[in-house]
Image (tube, rainbow, N blue to C red):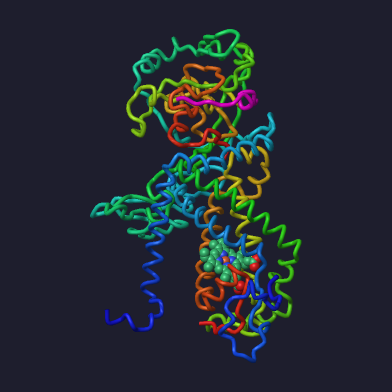
Amino acid sequence: MLAREMTPSPAVAPETRGLAQDEPVEARWLRRHSGLVRFTHWVNALCFIFLLMSGLQIFNAHPALYVGAQSEFEHPTISITAKRADHGIKGETMIFGHAIDTTGVLGVSTTGGQVTPRAFPSWSTIPSYQDLATGRLWHFFFAWMLVLNGLAYLVFGFASRHFRRDLLPSTAELRHIGADIVAHLRLRFPRGEAAKRYNVLQQLAYLAVVFVLFPLVVLTGLTMSPGIDTAVPQLLSLFGGRQTARLIHFLATCGLVTFVIVHLAMVLVSGVWNNIRSMVTGWYDLRTEPR
Amino acid sequence: MRNVSMKPKAPHRRGFLSAALSFFALSLSACDRLSSEPRARSVLDAASSLSYRVQRLLLGAHRLAPEYGETDISPVFRANGSTDPQDDEYLDLADREFADWKLKVDGLVEHELSLSLDDLRALPARTQITRHDCVEGWSCIGKWTGVPLAEILSRAGVKSQARYVVFHCADTLNDGSLGDDPESIRYYESIDLADAAHPQTILAYEMNGKKLDIAHGAPLRLRLERQLGYKMAKYVMRIELVRSFAGLHGGKGGYWEDRGYEWYAGI
Ligand code: HEM
């Protein structure tokens, strides 16, 4: 649907009063996103936030990750714990044997004015207080929603050729990737004709999110279920055991969080309202100055 | 008042940020409130019923949970929940090495049973090396030997009205959330008849080739390999067949279920 230029009917067109008299309407407004992509995008964003925050709640119940089928409690690959310190307690994050003092955010943080031992802080979890049972309720509810929504998006994406047309970079585009990276770093964004398509970096990021990170998170999530392991034991071999699956689930989530941060920064610097309007209503203003 | 006639200012960045933060804080406290609202919980819980149905479909009756090798057995198998029950009745039994302990089987059965450890050992046994997954997120691998629950149930004869198998345990575990009423703090669990008939569903009296120790549930514990650890009742005293668990304890079918955890713990 991306890059299909149309003359908007008055009923759906956004404000056009600002247009100069002699400008043709169709040169300005681009029907950028199809309804299904817009709908599934926002459902996905909602699910992602709930899954992330309830996931951190679940992580807090045993804030340590391991490689293999089982937990070698003395040797976690990653752990976030509270340690005794000279003055009270300190938060310590261990990553591959390196200890980092993360007091204040990870391991030890302030909850309701009280210094509390807690892996992820209260403001980052659902519910905000320690409650694994409720965290699981939220998590599995939104996991189902994310999966059903994601399937609808995938079916549509293939059937409508959205993936091939809009997300798959052409070889010519790939060859220009160097120039694109430089332009991005200088916060120069495509305008006019070039702005009608996702640029290569965008395409690659979306492809990674849609076809690598989300599938990884979903499959490793399923691998943590003893029921699913019984039905599909191949998942255990694929990911190297239940605890490795839990580790990958966490790391892929870190990848998604990184994506979302960059994604939001890009939305912000390349014309917030135009971007958001296009993702809500479908209409993209080709003449908006990115700022 | 001097500003009234002035043009509205462009949205201030600081204002936007603090508005976003307040919105975030409000949403968080809304989530907290929803979390303890029974109707909201039952909406969220619909996902759990869906998981149960889908997993039952995928699993069928007899698919076995993965089994591991001797070399995979965890050097340290973490014990969770009750690890040293202080209930008088239990302490007496433990003092005499469970020589007077009897497993009672009653409820919706043709013949009530009362079985000693020797009786159980004389029944057909199954040994399995399996992964134990705690709801908290960790896993340990152990070797378990015991009687398939199906053996016991076939001797008792399950009446056709029965739908669940309830395990009544010797330990009280008080996390403080439901008060001190002895009824609410006694451990119990329940499973459906499909899981009860599963070949890996055993009542274990041995762990890693030795007599089951107290920390892991002596003299007898349930192994339910396709679900999480909290389903696997330790210190089992009595097995009751019921049509519904609504009248038992908190009515949700288990100690942790009464405290908000899902009854179906296959995920
Ligand atoms: C809540 C804040 C978010 C905003 C404001 C936002 C905004 C946008 C916008 C404006 C686009 C279209 C970009 C363009 O036309 O060039 C887009 C596309 C996309 N966003 Fe987001 N997004 C948000 C959250 C997320 C999250 C949480 C994810 C995933 C973790 C995500 C994944 C994607 C993907 C994969 C696309 C491409 C969709 C396609 O064309 O098939 N977004 N987003």
Q: Which residues are magenta?
A: B188-200
Name the image quarter holding residue B197. top right
Estimate the x, y position of residue B173 in percent, counting from the top left.
38, 28
Residue at 74% of width from left, 77% of height from top? A171
**In this rendering, is residue B246 above or below A14?**
above
Q: Which of the pair A90/A216 is nearer the observer?
A: A216
The verdict on residue B212 being magenta is no
Residue at the far left: name it.
A87
Estimate the x, y position of residue B87 in percent, counting from the top left.
35, 20
Residue at the far top: name it.
B111
Q: Quadrant of ligand 1?
A: bottom right
Residue at 43% of width from left, 42% of height from top? B37
Residue at the far bottom: name it.
A22
The verdict on residue B199 being magenta is yes
Decide if residue A122 is in sight here: yes
How many numbered discs?
0
Name the image quarter holding residue B146. top right
Estimate the x, y position of residue B32 in percent, counting from the top left.
40, 48
Q: Which of the pair B111/A243 is nearer the observer?
A: B111
Decide if residue A207 is in sight here: no
**In this rendering, is residue A207 above or below A58?**
below
Residue at 40% of width from left, 61% of height from top? B23
Estimate the x, y position of residue B185 in percent, counting from the top left.
38, 26
Residue at 41% of width from left, 43% of height from top? A131
Quadrant (top left/top right/bottom left/bottom right) for the N terminus of chain A: bottom right
Quick check: A172 left or right of B51?
A: right
**In this rendering, is residue B103 above or below A141?**
above
Q: Which of the pair B112/B213 is nearer the observer?
A: B112
